[in-house]
Image (tube, rainbow, N blue to C red):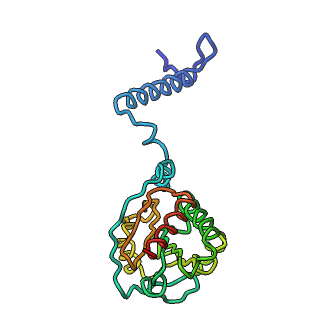
């Protein structure tokens, strides 16, 4: 009795090796199907991780306002977009009504929207800028966002006098972020938020999401009017 070769061709012209390969392939597919049915994974789990997913969710939400309790301490030295050391409370805010936003320069979702809103607010408040009102943009990624990077970013939004872009030592920046209620362990998860306040009266308002430029202008004018009463 002879040995049957794996290369023998059957009546249909197919080699036994090819038939074995096909059978093996079908078995693998069946095993894979059974595995997926036994251990199902959602489509979301199969998708690549999106570092901006949190921001995309916030972008879809409507803006909401709430009063905020904020107590700024003295001696908060930061760096502005020109590399100059400034004290947040004394040099930047002072006796002005202030609008504060939070960004990082590599952000591609929330931060460009917030920056664009601030640019429109700047135009609406042009006569009051740096006199009665200050705009502040504080990075949530001070490790990467150097003054030079902030300056380059600020130019994209035509930032003018009175619009301050701040960074600095990470511990100090984190301290300020915590004071403003904007700190998150992962800076990419920082909330989409705008603060408007009058430090002289300890009156602060927090807007979650993206308040319209007209809404910000109205609140600024309201706070300025309160000073006359």
46 is higher (above) or lower (below) than 162: above
Query: Residue 166 at what x, y percent from top left?
Result: 50, 78
Q: Does residue 14 sit above or below 61 in this rendering?
A: above
**Nearer to the camera, 179 or 22:** 179
The single residue placed furthest to the front in the displayed view is 229
Q: Residue at x 45, y 83 (%)?
A: 95
Q: Residue at x 41, y 65 (%)?
A: 205
Q: Is residue 139 visible?
A: no
In terms of depth relative to the viewer, which is nearer, 202 or 169?
202
Q: How many marks?
A: 0
Residue located 44% across and 60% down the image: 207
The C terminus lies in quadrant: bottom left
The residue closer to the viewer here, 34 or 75, is 75
In the displayed structure image, the side of residue 161 where residue 91 appears, left or right:
left
Residue 133 image position (x, y, % from top left): 53, 76
Q: Can residue 164 be seen in the rendering of this structure?
A: yes
Residue 31 at what x, y percent from top left?
41, 28
| 167 versus 114 height, above or below | below
Residue 190, horizontal then vertical, whole percent: 43, 62
Q: Residue furthest top?
A: 11
């Amino acid at each position: 009795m002879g040995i049957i070769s794996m290369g023998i061709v059957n009546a249909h012209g197919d080699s036994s090796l090819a038939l074995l390969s096909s059978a093996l392939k079908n078995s693998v597919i069946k095993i894979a199907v059974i595995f997926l049915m036994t251990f199902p994974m959602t489509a979301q789990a199969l998708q690549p991780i999106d570092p901006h997913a949190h921001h995309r969710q916030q972008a879809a939400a409507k803006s909401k306002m709430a009063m905020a309790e904020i107590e700024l301490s003295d001696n908060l030295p930061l760096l502005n977009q020109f590399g100059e050391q400034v004290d947040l409370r004394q040099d930047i805010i002072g006796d002005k009504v202030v609008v504060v936003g939070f960004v990082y320069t590599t952000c591609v979702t929330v931060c460009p929207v917030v920056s664009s809103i601030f640019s429109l607010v700047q135009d609406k408040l042009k006569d009051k800028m740096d006199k009665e009102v200050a705009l502040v943009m504080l990075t949530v990624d001070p490790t990467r966002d150097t003054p030079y990077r902030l300056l380059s970013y600020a130019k994209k939004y035509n930032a003018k006098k009175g619009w301050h872009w701040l960074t600095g030592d990470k511990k100090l920046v984190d301290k300020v972020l915590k004071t403003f209620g904007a700190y998150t362990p992962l800076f990419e998860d920082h909330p989409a938020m705008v603060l408007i306040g009058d430090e002289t009266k300890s009156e602060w308002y927090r807007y979650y999401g993206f308040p319209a430029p007209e809404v910000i202008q109205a609140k600024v004018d309201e706070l300025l009017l309160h000073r006359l009463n």
